[in-house]
Structures are given as structure tokens and as C-alpha cells.
């Protein structure tokens, strides 16, 4: 804290933590603090956020609408890779951090700030994601992580500090868990969820209907793709953010996208998280179906082998790394022919494919048919199988002769 700061840009949400941080930064460093808020699709009263930041002493308030950039430049590239962490998590929080950090660095440049700050704690993944992004985008920027250096290490201390400095603290009872929302998902962590045996309370979910309460009639939709990106819904061309928002509504109404998992954090501990990702769940299912008829087998299998590593890079915070960019180039090259339409049925928490078609399709009925055809000689399979089995026969012969150990 002995570093001299000229001007700080704080990633600000308007909640208790970042409101306290805003005032604490002013007191600690004695310089202007700019409150920067990123709209990535969370439900906020942005004028209220602006006013609260000014009332708390921000020298300037910057609110950026990043929804379209977020979906087009971050969510969709990740979707083209079918990214999924530890087989379950669709990376909704992870993928929002790099765009928030990127815009924060841009705001710092616009205002001539020499430092940035965030409200992530010293136990979670977000501190890593923010700070790796800052370092990649501006290696000379100073980084302030209050949770790692101050002594306000409990909710009561935060509330006392807030009241002492005239920062409004809601009288309502604190939520017994923490939430984070954007256009891709809502996450719930901590508090009552820290017992991995405890079922999440029904009233915790703010987005999706419980599958058992969803409509009794299935919903059928068609999603059109161009080079791996979803571009139409039921024939209507939509912007990336509008398409995802529409699918969120459809998925949420039908109870799609709930996940409850214990994941491995980058910092080394296990953490229980509950997520709602309605539109993202539908899109991943549709995209994989589109690939099933347009992607070459060996290309698909090679790409699939890279998905865990690619997903891990996003989860760990390495979006702006050369290795993620290298993998992205390979993945995007594989998507050249992933164009066509997928039909899906959505019903009570489930989403399944009922049809797929493409002018670029590699699926040819005349080859796949069980009926008589002239393009494939079934006799050819005999030599193919004999060659595939040669090494197995040799191994067995050696073992039977006593030569194997």
C-alpha cells in the first residue's frame, strides 16, 4: 500500500463490497477513483448504480453496455469449441471476466489512470482471471486487490465501515449465498450451498422454472448456424445477444440449464456451485448436432481432444494467452462448413435434437443405407477388419506360445 497512485479505475457493481472498496481506495491512496460498471446482461438499475457511485465519492462513473460484444466475441467463440469445464460447467462466470477486464483497461487508458482495482476475494478464481487479463492487456498497469491487503475480512466489518462512511446498506437480510449473473448464466455459491449434500432451496433459483413445474407441452425450435455461429431462431435472423436472450427465455420457461456441481478451483480447493444456463445449454446441444453432419471424423476427434484443455484455459483465466489464441484459430478453422439448421425439442428440463440438415452435410444416405447400394462393397470390409485385427492376432499368438510376459 506504499505505492503512489495517481488515478484508479475500480470494477464496480454497486453492491456492498465494491461500494466499500470505492471509499477505501479513496482513503488509502488519496487519489481520484473512477467507478466502472460493465453491463454484460445482468438485471440492474444502472441509473441507481451511477448515483450510488457518485454518492460514495467516485470522481467519474462509466457504465458500458457490452452485451453484444460479450456474446459475439467471447461466448460464441467458446461455443464454437463446445467448451465445458469438468464435463458439466458451461463457464458462464469465467468467460465474462476477460471482457470486463478488457473494457476496464480501455477506461483506464481513456482517463489516464495508472491503476485498476477489483472486488474479487483472495480465495476464488476471479482474482486470477481479472489480473491475468490486466497483465496481458497492459503490463505496466498497477493492480490493487483490496481483499488481499485490507483488514475488513468479515461482513460485519464491511457493514460497520459502510455505515461509518454514510454508504447505504440495505436493511434486508443478507442472502445466504453469493450470486453472479450475466447474459449466459446465473451462479450461486457459498453460504447454505457449502454443504455438498444439501439440496439447493427451491426459492433460490431466480431464472429457470423447476422442471417439474415447466409446461406439460414440449416446445420445438429451429436454430440456424453459419460457420459454427448461431444466427437464426425459427428462421428469424437475430443479433448474438438477442438470440441468446430469446433462447434464455425459452430455456428458463421449460426448466432447462440447471447444474449442481463440485468443481476444482484454480487456486487449489474444491467449491460447490449451482448454475442456471438455459440458452447456453440449448446452443451447445444444437451446435454439437450441427457438427455431427458437417465435421470430418478425424477433425472432430482431434478437436474434441483439445476441448478439456481449452475449457481449462478459460476457467483459469488465460483468455488472452497465446495458447488459447492458437487453439481458437484451429477451432475456428474447423467450423468453416458448420452451417445449416438444427431442430430441437425442449421439455421439462430436457433439450434433445429431433433433426439436422445442411447443404454442407457429409452424411450421404446412399453410403449409410442398409439397403442395396452400388457405392460401397460390403466385401471390402473383410480386408479392412483383417488388417485392423492383425496386431491383436500377433499379440495373442505370442502370449499363447509363452513368449509374452
Image (spheres, rainbow, N blue to C red):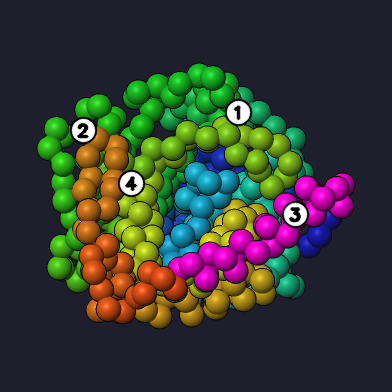
Mark sitting on residue 155: 1
Q: Secondary structure at mark 1?
A: helix
Q: CA distance from mark 3 to mark 4?
A: 54 Å
Q: Which residue is mark 3?
A: 397
Q: Are marks 4 and 2 in contact (CB under 8 Å)?
A: no
Magenta extent? 381-405
Q: CA distance from mark 1 to mark 2?
A: 37 Å
Mark sitting on residue 278: 4
Q: Secondary structure at mark 3?
A: helix
Mark sitting on residue 237: none
Q: CA distance from mark 3 to mark 2?
A: 59 Å
Q: Disc 4 or 1, which lies upstream in sequence?
A: 1
Query: Which circle, 3 or 4, is nearer the viewer?
Result: 3
Q: Are marks 4 and 1 in contact (CB under 8 Å)?
A: no
Which of these two is toward me, 240 or 255?
A: 255
User: How far across and down, in percent of the image, does residue 55 sit?
Assistant: 47, 48
Q: Which residue is mark 2?
A: 214
Q: CA distance from mark 4 to mark 2?
A: 13 Å
262 shown above or below 378 = above
Quarter-of-image position of residue 216 = top left
Tell me: 95 left or right of 355: right
55 shown above or below 369 = above
Query: Which circle, 1 or 2, is nearer the viewer?
Result: 2
Q: Dot 1, how many residues are within 10 Å of its Cα: few (below 14), some (14-19), or many (20+)?
A: few
Amino acid at each position: 500500500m506504499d505505492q503512489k497512485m495517481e488515478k484508479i479505475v475500480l470494477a464496480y457493481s454497486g453492491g456492498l463490497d465494491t461500494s466499500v472498496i470505492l471509499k477505501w481506495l479513496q482513503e488509502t491512496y488519496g487519489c481520484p477513483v473512477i467507478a466502472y460498471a460493465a453491463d454484460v446482461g445482468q438485471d440492474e438499475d444502472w441509473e441507481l448504480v451511477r448515483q450510488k457511485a457518485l454518492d460514495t465519492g467516485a470522481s467519474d462513473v462509466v457504465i458500458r453496455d457490452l452485451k453484444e460484444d460479450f456474446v459475439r466475441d467471447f461466448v460464441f467463440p467458446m461455443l464454437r469449441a463446445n467448451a465445458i469445464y469438468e464435463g458439466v460447467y458451461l463457464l458462464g462466470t469465467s468467460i465474462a471476466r476477460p471482457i470486463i477486464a478488457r473494457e476496464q483497461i480501455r477506461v483506464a487508458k481513456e482517463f489516464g489512470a495508472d491503476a485498476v482495482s477489483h472486488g474479487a476475494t483472495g480465495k476464488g478464481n476471479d482474482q486470477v482471471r481479472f489480473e491475468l487479463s490486466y497483465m496481458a492487456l497492459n503490463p505496466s498497469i498497477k493492480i490493487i486487490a483490496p481483499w488481499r491487503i485490507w483488514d475488513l475480512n468479515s461482513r460485519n466489518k464491511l457493514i460497520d465501515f459502510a455505515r461509518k462512511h454514510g454508504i447505504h446498506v440495505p436493511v434486508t437480510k443478507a442472502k445466504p449465498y453469493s450470486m453472479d449473473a450475466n447474459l449466459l448464466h446465473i451462479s450461486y455459491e457459498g453460504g447454505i450451498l457449502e454443504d455438498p449434500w444439501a439440496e439447493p432451496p427451491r426459492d433460490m433459483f431466480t431464472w429457470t422454472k423447476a422442471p417439474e413445474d415447466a409446461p406439460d407441452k414440449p416446445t420445438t425450435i429451429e436454430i440456424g448456424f453459419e460457420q459454427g455461429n448461431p444466427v437464426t431462431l425459427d428462421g428469424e435472423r437475430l443479433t448474438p445477444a438477442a438470440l441468446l436472450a430469446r433462447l434464455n427465455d425459452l430455456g428458463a420457461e421449460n426448466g432447462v440449464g440447471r447444474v449442481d456441481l463440485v468443481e476444482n478451483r484454480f487456486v487449489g480447493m474444491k467449491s460447490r456451485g449451482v448454475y442456471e444456463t438455459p440458452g447456453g445449454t440449448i446452443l451447445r446441444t444444437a451446435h454439437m448436432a450441427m457438427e455431427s453432419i458437417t465435421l470430418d471424423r478425424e477433425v472432430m476427434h482431434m478437436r474434441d481432444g483439445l476441448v478439456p484443455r481449452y475449457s481449462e484455459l478459460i476457467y483459469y483465466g488465460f483468455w488472452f494467452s497465446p495458447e488459447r489464441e492458437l487453439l481458437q484459430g484451429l477451432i475456428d478453422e474447423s467450423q468453416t462448413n458448420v452451417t445449416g439448421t438444427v431442430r430441437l425439442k425442449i421439455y421439462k428440463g430436457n433439450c434433445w435434437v429431433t433433426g439436422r440438415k445442411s447443404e454442407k452435410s457429409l452424411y450421404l444416405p446412399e453410403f449409410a443405407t442398409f439397403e442395396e447400394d452400388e457405392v460401397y462393397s460390403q466385401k471390402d470390409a473383410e480386408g479392412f477388419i483383417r488388417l485392423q485385427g492383425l496386431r491383436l492376432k500377433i499379440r495373442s499368438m505370442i502370449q499363447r506360445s509363452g513368449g509374452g510376459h
